[in-house]
Image (tube, rainbow, N blue to C red):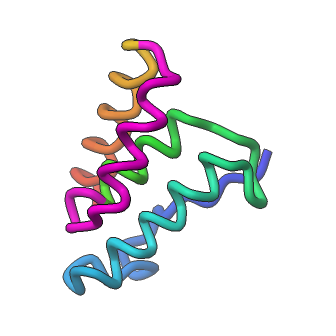
Amino acid sequence: MARFELNAPEMVALGEGPVAADLFYELGMRYSVGNSVPTDLVAAHKWFNIAALKGSQDAIRLRQEIAASMSAAEIAAAQRAARDWLTAH
């Protein structure tokens, strides 16, 4: 199973505002539609959440859209994953 995770902080310029938001938004898009990875709404929500925190208005909208197809447990898992990733990076 291929996963496009950003695990190394040097892979993303976190302090560069919109550039970083765009990268996280792209990861959310990949997981939401299954582009080069299996569709995974939890991972998509996670990356959209991070992109939204970085200022992406589109990520806010798409995070809400996919949340409508997720259970409360899945949303909680995605939020935990986003917090964990942000804490680690």
Q: Is residue 65 magenta?
A: yes
Q: Is residue 57 left or right of residue 45?
A: left
Looking at the rendered image, the quarter that the C terminus falls into is bottom left
Question: What predominant SS class does the magenta segment belong to?
Answer: helix
Locate residue 33, reporting x and y percent.
68, 49
Instruction: Locate residue 38: give its quadrant.
Output: top right
Residue at 28% over, 66% down: 56
Quadrant location, the N terminus: top right
Q: Is residue 42 above or below residue 1?
A: above
Q: Which residues are magenta?
A: 52-71
Considering only vertical position in the picture, is 89 above or below 85?
below
Q: Quadrant of residue 64?
A: top left
Give the residue drawn at x 42%, y 29%.
Answer: 67
Position of 67 relative to 19 (above/below): above
Look at 28% across and 81% down and name the residue there.
18
Magenta stretch: residue 18 in it? Answer: no
Q: Position of residue 3 (x, y in %)?
A: 67, 53
Q: Position of residue 55 (x, y in %)?
A: 21, 67
At x 46%, y 62%, the residue is 7
On screen, residue 59 above or below 9:
above
Is 7 placed left or right of 59 in the picture?
Answer: right
Number of residue marks = 0
Q: Is residue 75 left or right of residue 2?
A: left
Q: Position of residue 44 (x, y in %)?
A: 51, 45
